[in-house]
Image: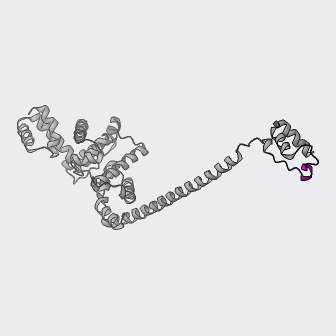
Amino acid sequence: MTCDRVRQKLVFYVDGSLGDAEKMEIEQHLKQCNVCAADYHVIVSTIDAARKIEVPEHDEAFWKIQYELTLSRAKQKLHRRTFMKRLRVASGIIGMVLLVFASMVYIEKNKPVNPVNPREIVYSIPDDILSESKIPIPVDELEKVVDSLAPEDHMMLLAEFLR
Amino acid sequence: MNEKDFEHLYKRYAPMLYRTAYRMVKNDADALDIVQDAFIRVFNGLGKFRNEANVQTWMYRIVMNLCYDYFRKRKRILFVSEKDIFDSEANQEMPVNESTGEFAELENQRKQNLQMALEKLTLRQKTVFNMRIYEELSYEEISKIMKIKVGTAKATFFQAVEKLKTIMKEMEKK
């Protein structure tokens, strides 16, 4: 194994993740090469120093209190989340109802007004006027004449009638 | 989730996750906050846990994400400038204890140097280094937690050690 190759593998040799064959090759090389051996010692001392960096230790009673605090906060958060979820569903339903209502009002307000067809107006002509004695032509003839009138004649007739 | 299961998980993993978080944020209160937030997520989201990953991997990932959020929020500068390192090193008067031998003093100095050198690692290098050295996780486990390839985890660890080695050498020369 060359020095370059050994130096690429040294870190993994120190952390113990190499296979037996590679381990043996490196050990062999370290016995013969002082430069690589020096590099090996630097890596070992760096990792050893890192392992000696302490982290504050907490006892069981401390973790028990921490657990209670965490559980209570977790429950609060869960309740808040459930409440917010329900609130969102309720707001959604209310929103939908309001939207449907507003749409109905809008549709009703903007309904197109059909122009009045004068032909569809039912004249309620008093019976005595319609009596054949007062009209020079029979009633069915008169109806035919009325049907054949132009809309503006209908309007005139209606105006005359209402006057 | 069942409170009994939660308590079991907490007892088993909280101290370990605390150590991981502490090594990242270097602050007791912040590390405890991270552990608490992680367990709140666990309590409220165990349904989302997929069985293919193990609980430990899943919890480590939550803690790692929270640590990353912590750094993002605080906009903490991870790279301490060279000047800062040597200035702080120069300003730190080592308490000389008569009973402490030269070797212990040297060890202490080395530990302090290394702590400063660790701050120079990138967040990813620091995470991989901590998981490998302190938690003794395999590269496969690290790759699952960090969602990276095994080769990337190995390369990151290699880069981290090389960087530490270089910084330590420079510090010792001074």
User: In this orientation, which residue lies closer to the viewer: B77 or A136?
Assistant: A136
Left-right relation of B51 to A129: left
Q: Is residue A101 above or below residue B166?
A: below
Left-right relation of A114 to B97: right
User: In this orientation, which residue lies closer to the viewer: A7 or A79?
Assistant: A79
Left-right relation of B95 to A113: left
Location of the N terminus of chain B by quadrant is bottom left
Q: Quadrant of residue B75?
A: top left
Residue B69 is inside the magenta segment = no
The structure residue drawn at horizontal position 29% and vertical position 50%, both measured from the top left corner, is B95
Residue A119 visible in the displayed image: yes
The structure residue drawn at horizontal position 87% and vertical position 45%, both measured from the top left corner, is A138
Looking at the picture, how far across and down is residue A46, in whole percent?
21, 43
Looking at the picture, how far across and down is residue B166, in whole percent?
23, 36
Q: Quadrant of residue B172?
A: top left
User: Range of the magenta residues?
Assistant: A123-131
Looking at the picture, how far across and down is residue B25, in whole percent?
35, 49
User: In this orientation, which residue lies closer to the viewer: B57 or B93?
Assistant: B57
Location of the C terminus of chain B by quadrant is top left
Q: Is residue B79 above or below residue A100?
A: above
